[in-house]
Amino acid sequence: MTKRAALYVDGFNLYHAVKDLNEQFLKWCNLWRLGELIIPAKTEKLVKVVFCTAYYPGDSKKRWRHDQFMNALRIAGVDCVLGHYIHEEWECRHCSVPWEKPTEKASDLNLGLSLITDAWNDVFDHAYLLTADSDQAATARFLKETIKGKSLTTVAPPGRNFSANIEKYSDGRILLTRDHFERCVFPATLLGVNGLPHAKRPTEYAPPAGWVHPDQRKPDNDTKPWSAAS
């Protein structure tokens, strides 16, 4: 029997990991396809992807890029769950001048609640939790100890270590690489479906000149993926 798989993505944890790859175009990533890549296709079918994030306040250009990315994800079938920011008052350590720091809230809770709610509602048989944040160990533990018959695989973003605390309650682990993201790059534009708005790739996420999507490469070139150094 084919098992139902679902992918739950910590948007901020993933964003910073991909940003550290220093290849902006990899941010324009189809997370539904990423889920399909990491599950065993012969025994599992992807039925849901959840992406948890929040809008950074006060930056209209960043907000537009974020909007386009979420438009693209929704067209691909991804559920986008929004948290929020608050402004916390901080004091400069050097001059003691107070300032307000934007602080993201609720995304980690949304991630855990989405996974556990779907487990209770029997949405999946096997959950894939994409984060290196050890705070999600509570989610993994609750799933393992409370909801029987569900499997969990911990998925580490590229360049990040696995959370040992999550791994204690996991049945497997997957380390993502740069190549996973290159294979999942969205096209430049996506037409909206079922009333969803179109998605347009921000110019900042355009691939380098000469880059060819892996799906469009000739078979004899597949053994040597394109890289920024080539």
Image: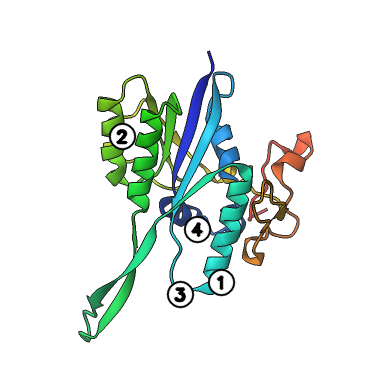
Q: Which residue is nearer to you in this view: 76 or 117?
A: 117
- Residue 118 drawn above or below residue 159: above
Please, what secondary structure does the residue beneath circle 1 have? helix
Q: Amino acid at mark 4?
A: Lys
Percent from the top left, x then y, of residue 67?
A: 56, 61
The residue that mark 1 highlights is: 61
Q: Nearer the viewer, mark 2 or mark 3?
A: 3
Percent from the top left, x then y, of residue 68?
A: 61, 59
Query: Which comes before the other along the chain, label 4 or label 1?
Result: 4
**Residue 58 circle label:** 3
Query: Which comes before the other along the chain, label 2 or label 4?
Result: 4
Please, what secondary structure does the residue beneath circle 2 have? helix
Q: Are marks 4 and 1 in contact (CB under 8 Å)?
A: no
Q: Tell me if I can see residue 161 in this picture.
A: no
Q: Nearer the viewer, mark 2 or mark 4?
A: 2
Residues under labels 2 and 4: Cα distance?
Answer: 26 Å
**Residue 19 circle label:** 4
Residues under labels 1 and 2: Cα distance?
Answer: 36 Å
Q: Residue at x 63, y 47 (%)?
A: 75
Query: Which comes before the other along the chain, label 1 or label 2?
Result: 1
Percent from the top left, x then y, of residue 20?
A: 48, 57
Q: Residue at x 49, y 73 (%)?
A: 59
Q: Is residue 91 left or right of residue 148?
A: left
Q: How is the image coloured?
A: rainbow
Q: Tell me if I can see residue 22 in this picture.
A: yes
